[in-house]
Amino acid sequence: MTANLVAAGHQVKGYDLNPEACIAAKEHGVEIVGSIAEAVQRSDAVFTMLPKGEHVRSVYEGHDGIWAHATAQTLLLDSSTVDIETSRFCHEGSLERGLKFVDAPVSGGISGAAAATLAFMVGGIPEHTAEAVEHIKPLAGKTIVAGGATTGIAAKICNNMMLFIDLMASAEGSQLAEKLGLDPKVFWEIASVSSGRSWAQQTWYPVPGVIDTSAANNNFDATFRVDLARKDVGLALDAGEMTGVKLPAATLAREHFDALIAEGLGDKDCSLIVKNVTPDGTVAGYTQEKK
């Protein structure tokens, strides 16, 4: 994403605790700085994208945090997938300090980030979301203003829940089709022009040798980690409890991810849930690694 901002002519500063991420960004023209303060100072816009709500809160708060160094001219955009409460915390805390903030989560995965075709869901005050759309253009295939504060993250939580439910369908359908004697590629082609088609089926199909973007081609090395998928579906279930909406399919998805985490596979790709539906727990494309 930072590479695409650089390619669009922006001067981009980056800060990350992961040295490998910094090296990769620097190779694409990002100026790596040594603190949050350096990243925020004299910046027109500040993007954050972090694993969990606690991480987002930690980079906003404190004497070294974003709030301490942003100005009224700086637009703050959080593209993390977090709980509604954390997003509201960022909105309210920014407003209290006279700062501009939008929640701006994304969908589209690693491939969408690389190709600048991500879908952004943006929530906030109208004049702030309008400004955000302009900053997002180099990263996005589609940007939709969802509404007011926290509506972007609400849309993201609901969308990811649907994604993992679709992923369960691909896992079960792919394995049943194989056991019934269908060629995996042929069945995938049939589903692709039939009612079984979905983004998960098109992009994360959990069978090796069918589509290039499947983690099954690479021993299910993560394109989207199990533990992060578990976090996201947990956010949906928390929202379900808050609203009273019953989410049985999302509950089943959580059980799939919990089972893999219990096996020590939290760092593998979330499509490895296919392992849970096979008769003996083995699946094409996956070889158990020695820990």
Image (tube, rainbow, N blue to C red):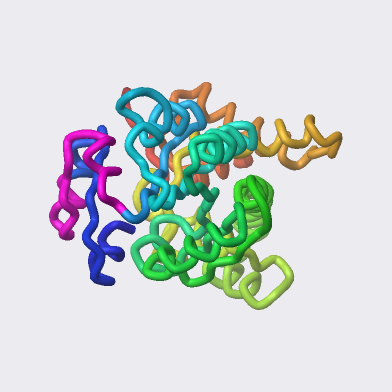
Q: Does residue 207 appear in this view?
A: yes
Q: Residue at x 68, y 57 (%)?
A: 147
Q: Residue at x 26, y 33 (%)?
A: 17
Q: Residue at x 47, y 64 (%)?
A: 118
**Is residue 4 placed above or below 172 in the rendered structure?**
below
Which residue occupies the foreground of this view, 243 or 131?
131
Q: Where in the figure is residue 269, as x and y percent of width and height?
A: 45, 43
Q: Where in the figure is residue 50, as x and y percent of width and height?
A: 42, 38
Q: Where in the figure is residue 249, as x and y percent of width and height?
A: 75, 42
**Is residue 58 placed above or below 236 in the rendered structure?**
above
Q: In what quadrant of the picture does the C terminus appear? A: top left
Does the magenta-highlighted stretch encompass residue 32? yes
Q: Does residue 161 appear in this view?
A: no
Chain part drawn in magenta:
23-43
Which residue occupies the foreground of this view, 149 or 290?
149
Q: Residue at x 37, y 44 (%)?
A: 71
Hey, which residue is sitting farthest bottom in the picture? 193
Q: In what quadrant of the picture does the N terminus appear? A: bottom left
Residue 70 position by quadrant: top left
Does the magenta-highlighted stretch encompass residue 35? yes
